[in-house]
Amino acid sequence: MSRYVFEFSEGNASQKDLLGGKGANLAEMTNLGLPVPPGFTITTDACRVFLRTGELPSELADEIDAHLAELETTMGRTLGHIDDPLLVSVRSGAKFSMPGMMETVLNIGLNDDSVEGLAKVSDNPRFAWDSYRRLLSMFGSTVLGIDRSVFDDALDELKTGRGAETDVDLGAADFRELVSSYHAIIKEHTGEPFPQDPRKQLELSVRAVFSSWNTERAKIYRRQERIPDDLGTAVNVCTMVFGNLGDDSGTGVCFTRDPATGHRGVYGDYLVNAQGEDVVAGIRNTLPLTALGETDPASYERLLEIMSTLESHYQDLCDIEFTVERGTLWMLQTRVGKRTAAAAFRVAVQLVDEGVIELDEALRRVTGAQLAQLMFPQFDVTDDRQLIATGMAASPGAAVGKAAFDSATAVAWAAQGEDVILVRRETNPDDLRGMIAARGVLTSRGGKTSHAAVVARGMGRTCVVGVDALRVDPQAGEFRAPGGVCVKEGDLLSIDGSTGKVFTGSVPVTQSAVVEALLAPGRTADDQTADDRPVAGEAEDDTAEADTAEADTERAELIDAVARVMEHADSVRRMGVLANADTPQDASRARDFGAQGIGLCRTEHMFLGSRRKIVEQVILARSDEQRETALERLLAPQRDDFKGIFEAMDGFPVVVRLLDPPLHEFLPDLTELSVRVAVAQALGRPEEEAAALLKEVQRHHEQNPMLGMRGVRLGLVIPGLFLLQVRAIAEAAAELRSRGLDPRPEIMVPLVGDVKEFAIIREQAAATVQEVSDELGVDLRFPIGTMIELPRAAMTASQIAEEAEFFSFGTNDLTQTAWGFSRDDVEAEFFPHYIEAGIFGVSPFETLDVDGVGRLVSIAAWEGKESRADLVLGVCGEHGGDPDSIHFFESIRLDYVSCSPFRVPVARLESARARLLADDAASEESD
Ligand code: PEP
Ligand code: MG
């Protein structure tokens, strides 16, 4: 029989699937002997039953009763007792953290009677009534679905009436009055009074937390973070401890290292006389953690001890939520902390240097997405810019956009292609859409752990929080800054998520230091610091120079960390990483980024521009002679194209794909030509040549050019076209060879569906290479292979492999043809709807559809290898640079991935991680 409830003392950190992240870590801390308030976890299994059936599992009520009874015995108090009530919190906790997305209800067990008991035992009526009003508003909004703002408005009204600045200025009588208002609100909105039975409060709260798994904002968050929809959440029922019992109490959040830089130290926020949600919501501005050291040195010292215990135990940066109740410290949560991309690299390497982890583990702890983020541009510090205020650097990057003061505007403008900065006092989960749409997020309140900071960091959005100096007025659509600056909706704004600085206007951005370092791996971190020191003399205040020096050091550390991780990645990965490039410039940039060759050199663009007219003549030629003359004119320029690229990739393979355009790209536009001919005719000056051309263009016109005369079909139908390219490749290689270089071209045939198509071209190509070889007296031989980008090719891979020396999976076309999706049209047309409906979480053109397209790839790879053992397997569709897809390609043991030059570092890193994680999974299976 399944069990749905576990005491904290029964679990451990490895049980996140069952107990959720929070529950598993509470269990781990309990077993480490840390001061965790006793409680129990209701499993994700129970949630999944609830989500499936709409009912809690039938055994659950009895299990909860039994565990509650045990908890009451441990605590010596009864839930909701009128004299000395035990109170509990009910908190969500999924396997992957979803900050602020799901629900929490605190102070369960309070009712009209037990609040009096609490007032007496605590000797603090203000605290008791404050706690009760918090329960009513949380329960009212979370469980009963009343808009939270109704409660907030009542509180604001009361504060205004009392002339109170903050909640701290309100007393017991005020909260008692607020409780009456809240009761009335609940009755008015639901028709029922607030449930006085504590056990009923608990059950309804558990249901509400389970249901919150499927709120719109939670779904959006999961989609964004690629968290599976079917995991469900656990619920943690935990004895309440109180940070709002007076000035000797408080609550806070801290990190064992700075989550922005990775530096060791004491980082965190603390709020005196407050409950946890006050910190996370950023409602009041927090104090730095060191403030606790001054007011309560004993708790502070104990906290530092625990931070150190947790870091050593988890061997990683931890983030921690804690409460001090009348001088006693309690741990409410810990987890391996979210961090910025830069901190991820720094912390990983710092831990290696501290002897805590190995380099392999460092590699597991960083991701390609983080590396990509570090490759973002940054503001040009030498530019003359107007600094208007500085807040907290919450999530790095340089974002420029128009100020939008609400999420709907941000979403609407972003949909029109505008760059937007979302400006709010603080954000809440309803701002998620706006945050996703915006380039950056700016808030005037909140700390590094506020909702805005945590969510933006998680999604890699640039974010600055807690800019106290700004007076944000969302109604008026403006904010005011010191010095009389007023920024209105639509005005341009630049925010620096790495320094917390806010500028008016659009500040130019510069290349990221990591990109510079990746492009020049020979340079050491020290060189970087010396060479690239930002120009001095733009001091904005006295500390600017010190800031600059610190920034230099941080940058040097980061560059060093990235370089070391990348070096290790290159030693670990099995798959090669090549680039898609078709100019000498792209080829050399790809080399600089570490590409080991070109996996896809598209040749289409080489035939556009001034050469398009010649191709038109090739296609429309009425005689062999006409065609040959036109082809002859293309030979020399095409040979020069290849010489440039082979030279830039000297000593590395260059897979040249023979021409693969939809035919219409090389012919005059049908509509334009028709109009021209018709107009000329109407004017009585018919253009005969144009009319003849129109007839030809009409003859070649296709309804579905992407499924028409493309790829190998073109090569078969237009004699000499592919062979011209093969000759150009061979002649270019021969010439470079004679100059002592080492060109390594390979010839790739596109859009093959049947082995016979390929066999004909292969034979002709091989003969042409031989011809050039004989003519020039140079021994030339190039591998000849094919793209696999049609389902039929995948299904007949064993036949094709008998002829082809390599396969390169063209997963763009393979996705298009496997799904029957037009790759040019569907993404804008209906993908948003598909994503909304959960048909897929992410576009299959971005991340490989493993179940469908991936299966075609793996069947073709497997069967291809069966028929030719030395068949080389690669991928050159967009998926070659996508982290998730790379893990799949490793799992089916492709030989290489090929992607755009800028994604090469990410592919190098993820290929290595994929190999490590695959090895981990294999050894787990064999255990
Ligand atoms: C592909 O189809 O995946 C591919 C790489 O070719 P193209 O994108 O040029 O069609
Ligand atoms: Mg293709």
Image: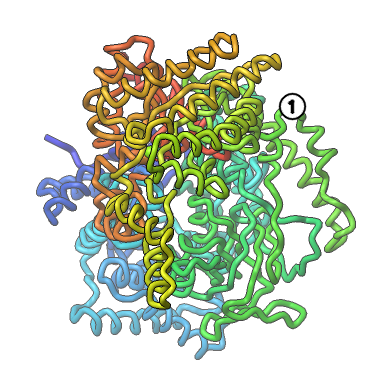
Query: How packed is label 1: few (under 14 Cα within 10 Å), some, or many (20 or more)?
Result: few
Residue 456: x and y, percent? 52, 56
Read off the residue under disc 1: 522
Mark 1 and ligand 1: say if the CB distance to the nearest ligand atom is below 8 Å: no
* Side (left or right) of 299 relative to 748: right
| Secondary structure state at the residue bearing disc 1 | loop
The quarter of the picture showing ligand 2: top left
Quarter of the image for residue 896 reads top left
Residue at point 40%, 17% (across, down) = 872
- Res 740 seen here: yes
For this rendering, which residue is in front, 626 or 432?
A: 626
For this rendering, which residue is in front, 886 or 281?
A: 886
Residue 860: x and y, percent? 28, 24
Q: Furthest residue to the bottom?
A: 161
For the image, the number of numbered tags is 1
Residue at point 30%, 82% (across, down) = 185
For this rendering, which residue is in front, 550 or 840?
A: 840
* Side (left or right) of 334 relative to 584: left
Residue at point 62%, 22% (across, down) = 355
Q: Amino acid at mark 1?
A: Gly
Is the residue 634 above or below the residue 504 in the image?
Answer: above
For this rendering, which residue is in front, 868 or 218?
A: 868
Residue 578: x and y, percent? 52, 28
Residue 795: x and y, percent? 22, 27
- Res 311 seen here: no
Q: Quadrant of the C terminus?
A: top left
* Side (left or right) of 438 relative to 803: right
Q: Quadrant of the N terminus?
A: top left
Is the residue 142 above or below the residue 713 in the image?
Answer: below
Quarter of the image for residue 728 reads top right
Q: How is the image coloured?
A: rainbow
Quarter of the image for residue 306 reads top right
